[in-house]
């Protein structure tokens, strides 16, 4: 036996093929990785192996121990160096034949059993006893106890053993997630989803459909982006406006679209914004996905169809209402029933935490992916020790807000939070946390409303990142001889809500020059605060003939056609509202033309326009165009389809 | 009886400090007190220990010590150990079954008797053994069955 | 009273020994489950009343010594067949089949006058009276280590156990034997697991002691599930303190701070006695923190099993201790490394634990010289079935089956023919009479297609049908299978179906049965399934002709299989009507003084009539 080169790797032989893998890998796992087939009916990569079906029997031997051989289950046997594995030894094949014949007698109708039996030459069950098609692989029970509420289990033992809910009645704990039915290899668990009703284990679950406020919908399509099943569709109406439609025959009611809608045009049945935002002062507010098993009355729990349904507004409201901390319990990404619900939840939490940090509340929102029946309780216990170091939340209020969702709601919350004297906003720390320079310089780059929007959009629209934005703005100013420091405000313009700018004015004092990111902010500062301010937009426009420098900075050759395009064409889109169809069409034509001229980068002026641009170029529409933002003025990278 | 079930089940769980690994012992104590596991008690145990109800039922139906249906006032255990088997337990079971009109595991309609089999009680020298209530009877023959069943019926 | 040092223990021991020495006479009433079933408790009460009536000074507890009689209940004497037993010291007389009515005479004759009550004495088949235990063949061939003092001590009395040298082994260990050395002693003794597997105990302890883990556990397995086995029962009821002492020593050796005793639920008396023993040990400072002031902390608690044979399997037992369904896990990672709560765990049978104190005090060499090269020491067996003297025995390993059945057991009842002996319970197999010369040791039994198992020896005569026996065990295991894996759950159901058909005289292919057995054997997840087919394979190996008789001739040679036998009444019936009276199915009819008849349709074949017939006119 040769010692393997890598100390962690061991060498084994499966059916005369020499393979290397880390010690401890299960034989079945290794065989699967290399396309060596070993039959199995009770194994699933997301679940602990249990060795119930016994079909994955293999015979093992070892050159060091002549004469030693043993039949083991491949799903449970960890490999060790030098092991020789025979997946088709006569003994193993014979045992598999007997086992398959026994299974076939039990479940003669199950296609998966029949197919396997046939492959092993077992055509007919000798003593058919099809009292139940269930082969007791226990996958359903394991998936329910590992990733859901543990509503079903095996009852009785031996030949009487069956998978059932307690007392064979509709299980109280079942949340209708359907994982059991989906994982069942013999389709033994009846499950239907029709007309918004899921039926399983003699229980009915109403799906919580999104409710659309067509008047508020901007047709931005974020819901399209987020939906794991691509159900929402933005359609163009006769007047050219766009509105989303959601086909209820396919919608699964996770509420992700409702959570991310920036215009507040979506709400959800049974889980309305009004209901969900109405939290209560509590030590730890727990929010969880329906599949999280929660069995303590110690903490209040808010159960949602999916943690992706959580909004930043909800989280802030809970903090405003005095929660010391918020614990969001979900599944890990790969075990999320809605595929990307968990990532969405994590992003929402990251936003909310960033905002809370900005206003001086610190990090108080935690996300935990839990497994198993004790996962939530353990997560809470772990959080309690973390919480010991948290300063108390000074807030305890129930202000009346006008908006319940969307950006407007968020701006309202932020405006309210900015006015709280009990909070000590620590902007310098926040800047440091975002890895941004925080030293004082003569020129001030006034962030205004932009970071809020940015944070809000960041997760939804990839590449939309405040940090690179701000750094590039600073570099641009530096280039024009203006050494600037970032002044982090929550916004003076109308985007940022009513309050705050007076506060900002006091802090700004008599700084000589204030450059804002947003044109509206510049206007507001001048109008209300009498502070001379100029927006970066204006600054760039006034100096756009010098922009070839940007192209150089981007390492484009000086004679690149893009430079010309950069210098000569500017797209101006200042509205946040969607473009009318003809204008959109015009823009598409423009982009195509630019591309045909060899342009790789275009300049786009405002973030709102950029967001809109992003919508226009989202997957499924203008796929060949990909955008990359630089501050307010973005270079639109045109990837020619050639 | 059922009125004070809740506090008593709570007391039983408290005896084991609501420890989940004591589930089997908690169920045994409940079984001992009520001669079966009432559904409401099982729900209470699941809540009290923070376990899924399905797990509690899974345990309650796995182990032979538990019964989910009320037991007769007198439980008759016929030992089915090997010695008792070779010394005639099957005949005893057949006779008892016929005499009481119930199969092993069942309870008579008047709730007087429950007939059960047990896999060896360790009194093999006395085989076959029948335990009526808590009274062990050694070397039982089918002919003695009627006298075995003459137990004072403690109907309240 | 709390013993805070080894010195205090020794001093207390001397006090107890002195108390014991005060008594003039000791009267031991066996109160094992067997004797209790036959009224031992009433006998004890009657003896006490008789003492009062006769004015004999007596005490029931060692803590209140007197000059007169120490009247005590004890654990199992062994010869359960002849219980209730009363043993009188210092003469060492043994009285059998004692009834409460005999109490007055025992007190008057034996305790007052010091004479023998001859009618209660064992009478050998040669007609001679054998009043003392040493004269009774049943006891003569035994060597008792685990069951030592089982029938001599009051199982509830810590005083009695300590007076008899109890906890001396623990004191010896704590006063300067390092844990590693304790393990070495157990290794050198050659002690192997008494629960069935026969894994070397010392090796198990060492593996556990060396395994990484935050906590270590030790477990005493008292979930004696094999039908026909009651050694563990007798030990737990008879010498609970010895098991506890063994476990404390084990905890010290492997570094465990908590332990569990998993006791079968069907053994209420054992639970009660162990519970009481634990309380006494805690009170005496022999359990809990800082045992005997030596810095050893150890907690021991009792868990009652839930009534599942599969929980005798170590991984299932551990799941059960965790309060879960007793389903075994595949053991590619041993439980000594990852056992209870995934921590290193030593699980030993209570009999194994009971052997530990003697190995410490008497030395590994002393233990190792008993038994054979393969199997050291002694082993307790429950000798039952169609044998004259059934009961609890302990013999050196290597004693032949023949010696056990004939010398100790006194042969077959009703002068029957010795046919076979089943060892190892449902996981074991049958050893036919022609192999009775085989020694009782691990290797020899395995070779013969059986196994040591926990120690049940069920003796069978010509009236035992081997097919029926195999079917009985398969049925037993079918009910006890946890149902997790396919070969055991579905395979045993199939096997039972096939055997059922054979016992009904329907043709079956024996080759098919063998193939099925092989798949179950190699395919099952745990020991229960893997060994489940042993009763079938061993009976097929030695008694194939009996299977063939069922299949080909529709006959059950032993007259057991009910589908193949018919009860009928012969001509010599005197018409006494007794059979008609006892028949539970009213299947017998006939005029008084006229020959009766059995209605085969109604007959349950229970055999009640056969028993009561005064002229043996009813035959199968």
Image (tube, grey):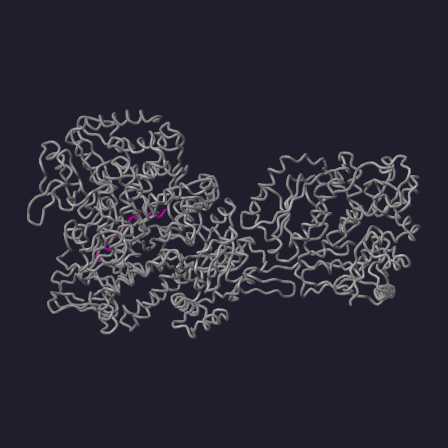
As for residue C463 lying within the magenta part, the answer is: no
- Left or right relative to A51: residue C182: left
Q: Is residue A395 above or below residue A301?
A: above
User: Percent from the top left, x then y, of residue B88?
Assistant: 23, 58
> Can I make out residue B68 in this image?
no
Viewport quadrant of the N terminus of chain B:
top left
Say whether residue B143 is magenta.
yes
Q: Residue furthest left?
A: C127
The magenta stretch is B142-156
Q: Position of residue A212 (x, y in %)?
A: 75, 59
Residue C565: x, y in percent? Answer: 22, 68
Picture coordinates of residue A350, whole percent (x, y): 70, 47
Q: Which residue lies at the image location 20% right of the left edge and 65% below the top edge?
A: C558
The tally of labels here is: 0
- The relative height of residue C248 versus residue A41 in the rendered view (above or below) is above
Residue C247 quadrant: top left
Front residue of C521 and A481: A481
Q: Is residue B150 left or right of residue A568?
A: left
For residue C370, above or below residue B58: above
Residue C507 is at least partly visible in this image: yes
Q: Quadrant of residue C188?
A: top left
Frontmost residue, C326 versus C53: C326
Foreground of the two, A251 or A401: A251
- Left/right of residue A119 with respect to residue A427 in the rendered view: left
């Amino acid at each position: 036996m040769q010692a393997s080169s890598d100390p962690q790797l061991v060498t084994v032989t499966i059916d005369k093929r020499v393979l290397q893998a880390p010690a401890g890998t299960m034989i079945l796992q290794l065989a699967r990785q290399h396309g060596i087939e070993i039959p199995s009916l009770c194994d699933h990569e997301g679940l602990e192996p249990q060795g119930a079906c016994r079909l994955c029997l293999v015979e093992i031997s070892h050159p060091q121990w002549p004469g030693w051989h043993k039949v083991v289950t491949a799903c449970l046997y960890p490999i060790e160096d030098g092991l020789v594995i025979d997946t088709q030894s006569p003994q193993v094949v014979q045992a598999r034949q007997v086992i398959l014949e026994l299974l076939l007698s039990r479940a003669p109708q199950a296609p998966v059993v029949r197919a396997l039996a046939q492959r092993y030459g077992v055509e007919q069950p000798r003593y058919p006893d099809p009292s139940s098609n269930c082969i007791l692989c226990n996958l359903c029970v394991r998936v329910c106890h590992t990733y859901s509420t543990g509503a079903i289990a095996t009852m009785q033992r031996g030949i009487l053993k069956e998978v059932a809910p307690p007392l064979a009645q509709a299980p109280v704990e079942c949340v209708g997630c359907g994982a059991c039915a989906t994982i069942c290899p013999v389709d033994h668990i009846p499950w239907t989803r029709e007309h918004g009703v899921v039926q399983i284990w003699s229980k009915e679950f109403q799906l919580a459909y999104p409710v659309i406020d067509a008047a508020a919908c901007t047709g931005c399509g974020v819901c399209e982006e987020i939906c794991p099943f691509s159900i929402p569709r933005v359609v163009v109406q006769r007047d050219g406006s766009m509105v989303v439609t959601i086909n209820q025959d396919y919608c699964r009611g996770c509420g992700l679209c409702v959570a991310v809608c920036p215009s507040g045009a979506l709400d959800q049945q049974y889980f309305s914004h009004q209901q969900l935002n109405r939290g209560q002062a509590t030590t730890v507010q727990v929010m969880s996905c329906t599949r999280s098993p929660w069995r303590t009355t110690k903490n209040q729990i808010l159960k949602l169809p999916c943690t992706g349904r959580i909004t930043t507004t909800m989280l802030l409201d809970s903090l405003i209402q005095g929660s010391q901390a918020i614990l969001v319990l979900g599944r890990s990404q790969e075990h999320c029933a809605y595929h990307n619900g968990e990532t969405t939840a994590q992003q929402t939490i990251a936003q909310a935490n960033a905002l809370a940090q900005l206003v001086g509340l610190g990090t108080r929102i935690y996300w935990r992916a839990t497994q198993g029946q004790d996962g939530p309780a353990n997560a809470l216990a772990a959080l309690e020790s973390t919480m010991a170091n948290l300063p108390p939340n000074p807030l305890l209020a129930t202000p009346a807000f006008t908006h319940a969702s969307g950006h407007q709601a968020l701006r309202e919350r932020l405006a309210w939070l900015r006015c709280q004297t009990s909070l000590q906003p620590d902007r310098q720390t926040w800047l440091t946390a975002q890895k941004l320079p925080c030293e004082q310089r003569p020129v001030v780059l006034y962030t205004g409303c932009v970071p809020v929007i940015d944070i809000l959009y960041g997760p939804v629209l990839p590449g939309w990142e405040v940090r690179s934005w701000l750094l590039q703005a600073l570099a641009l100013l530096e280039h024009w001889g203006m050494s600037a420091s970032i002044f982090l405000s929550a916004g003076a313009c109308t985007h940022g809500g009513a309050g705050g700018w007076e506060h900002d004015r006091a802090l700004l004092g008599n700084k000589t020059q204030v450059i804002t990111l947003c044109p509206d902010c510049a206007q507001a500062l001048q109008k209300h605060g009498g502070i001379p301010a100029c927006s970066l937009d204006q600054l760039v426009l006034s100096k756009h003939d010098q922009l070839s420098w940007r192209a150089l900075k981007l390492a484009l050759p000086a004679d690149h056609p893009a430079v010309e395009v950069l210098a000569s064409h500017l797209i101006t889109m200042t509205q946040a509202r969607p473009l009318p169809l003809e204008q959109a069409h015009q823009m598409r034509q423009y982009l195509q033309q630019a591309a045909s001229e060899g342009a790789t980068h275009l300049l786009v002026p405002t973030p709102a326009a950029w967001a809109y641009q992003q919508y226009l170029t989202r997957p499924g529409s203008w796929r060949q165009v990909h955008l990359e933002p630089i501050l307010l003025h973005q270079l639109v990278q045109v990837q020619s389809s050639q | 009886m059922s009125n004070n079930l809740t506090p008593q089940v709570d007391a039983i769980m408290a005896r084991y400090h609501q420890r989940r690994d004591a589930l089997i012992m908690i169920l045994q104590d409940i079984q001992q007190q009520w001669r079966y596991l009432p559904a409401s008690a099982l729900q209470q145990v699941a809540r009290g220990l923070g376990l899924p109800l399905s797990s509690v039922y899974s345990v309650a139906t796995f182990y032979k010590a538990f019964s989910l249906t009320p037991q007769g006032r007198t439980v008759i255990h016929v030992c089915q150990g090997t010695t008792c088997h070779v010394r005639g337990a099957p005949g005893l079971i057949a006779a008892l079954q016929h005499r009481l009109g119930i199969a092993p595991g069942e309870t008579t309609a008047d709730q007087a008797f429950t007939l059960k089999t047990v896999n060896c009680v360790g009194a093999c020298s006395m085989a076959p053994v029948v335990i009526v209530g808590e009274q062990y009877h050694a070397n039982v023959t089918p002919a003695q069955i009627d006298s075995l069943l003459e137990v004072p019926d403690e109907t309240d | 009273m709390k013993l805070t040092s080894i010195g205090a223990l020794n001093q207390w021991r001397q006090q107890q020994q002195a108390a014991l020495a005060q008594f003039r006479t000791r009267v031991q009433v066996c109160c094992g489950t067997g004797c209790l079933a036959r009224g031992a408790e009433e006998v004890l009460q009657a003896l006490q009343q008789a003492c009062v009536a006769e004015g004999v000074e007596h005490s029931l507890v060692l803590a209140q010594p007197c000059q007169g009689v120490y009247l005590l209940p004890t654990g199992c004497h062994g010869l359960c067949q002849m219980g209730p037993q009363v043993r009188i010291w210092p003469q060492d007389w043994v009285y059998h089949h004692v009834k409460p009515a005999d109490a007055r005479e025992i007190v008057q004759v034996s305790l007052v006058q010091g004479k023998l009550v001859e009618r209660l004495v064992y009478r050998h088949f040669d007609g001679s009276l054998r009043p003392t235990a040493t004269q009774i063949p049943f006891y003569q061939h035994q060597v008792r280590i685990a069951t030592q003092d089982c029938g001599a001590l009051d199982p509830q009395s810590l005083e009695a156990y300590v007076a008899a040298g109890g906890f001396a082994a623990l004191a010896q260990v704590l006063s300067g034997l390092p844990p590693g050395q304790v393990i070495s002693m157990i290794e050198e003794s050659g002690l192997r697991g008494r629960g069935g597997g026969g894994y070397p105990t010392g090796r198990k302890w060492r593996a556990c002691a060396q395994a990484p883990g935050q906590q270590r556990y030790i477990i005493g397995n008292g979930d004696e599930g094999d039908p026909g086995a009651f050694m563990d029962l007798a030990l737990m009821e008879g010498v609970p303190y010895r098991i506890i002492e063994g476990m404390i020593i084990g905890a010290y050796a492997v570094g465990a701070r908590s332990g569990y005793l998993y006791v079968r639920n069907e053994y209420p008396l054992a639970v009660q006695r162990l519970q009481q023993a634990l309380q006494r040990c805690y009170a005496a400072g022999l359990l809990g923190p800082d045992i005997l002031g030596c810095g050893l902390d150890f907690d021991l608690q009792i868990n009652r099993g839930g009534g599942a044979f599969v929980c005798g399997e170590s991984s299932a037992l551990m799941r059960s201790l965790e309060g879960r369904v007793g389903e075994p896990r595949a053991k590619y990672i041993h439980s000594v490394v990852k056992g209870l709560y995934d921590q290193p765990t030593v699980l030993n049978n209570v009999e194994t634990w009971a052997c530990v104190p003697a190995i410490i005090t008497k030395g590994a060499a002393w233990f190792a010289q008993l038994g054979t090269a393969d199997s050291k020491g002694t082993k307790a067996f429950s000798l039952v079935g169609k044998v004259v003297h059934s009961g609890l025995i302990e013999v050196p390993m290597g004693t032949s089956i023949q010696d056990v059945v004939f010398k100790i057991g006194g042969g077959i009842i009703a002068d029957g023919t010795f046919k076979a002996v089943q060892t190892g319970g449902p996981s074991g197999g049958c050893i036919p009479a022609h192999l009775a010369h085989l020694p009782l040791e691990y290797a020899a039994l395995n070779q013969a297609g059986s196994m040591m198992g926990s120690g049940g020896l069920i003796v069978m005569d010509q009236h035992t049908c081997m097919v029926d026996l195999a079917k009985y065990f398969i049925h037993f295991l079918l009910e006890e299978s946890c149902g997790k894996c396919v070969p055991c759950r579905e395979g045993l159901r199939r096997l039972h179906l096939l055997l059922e058909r054979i016992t009904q005289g329907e043709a079956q292919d024996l080759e098919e049965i063998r193939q099925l057995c092989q798949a179950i054997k190699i395919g099952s997840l745990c020991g229960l399934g893997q060994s489940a087919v042993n009763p079938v394979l061993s009976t097929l190996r030695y008694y194939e002709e009996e299977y063939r008789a069922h299949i080909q001739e529709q006959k059950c040679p032993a007259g057991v299989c009910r589908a193949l036998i018919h009860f009928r009444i012969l001509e010599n019936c005197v018409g006494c009507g007794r059979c008609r009276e006892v028949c539970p199915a009213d299947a017998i009819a006939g005029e008084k003084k006229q020959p009766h008849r059995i209605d085969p349709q109604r007959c349950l074949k229970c055999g009640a009539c056969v028993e009561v017939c005064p002229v043996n006119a009813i035959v199968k």
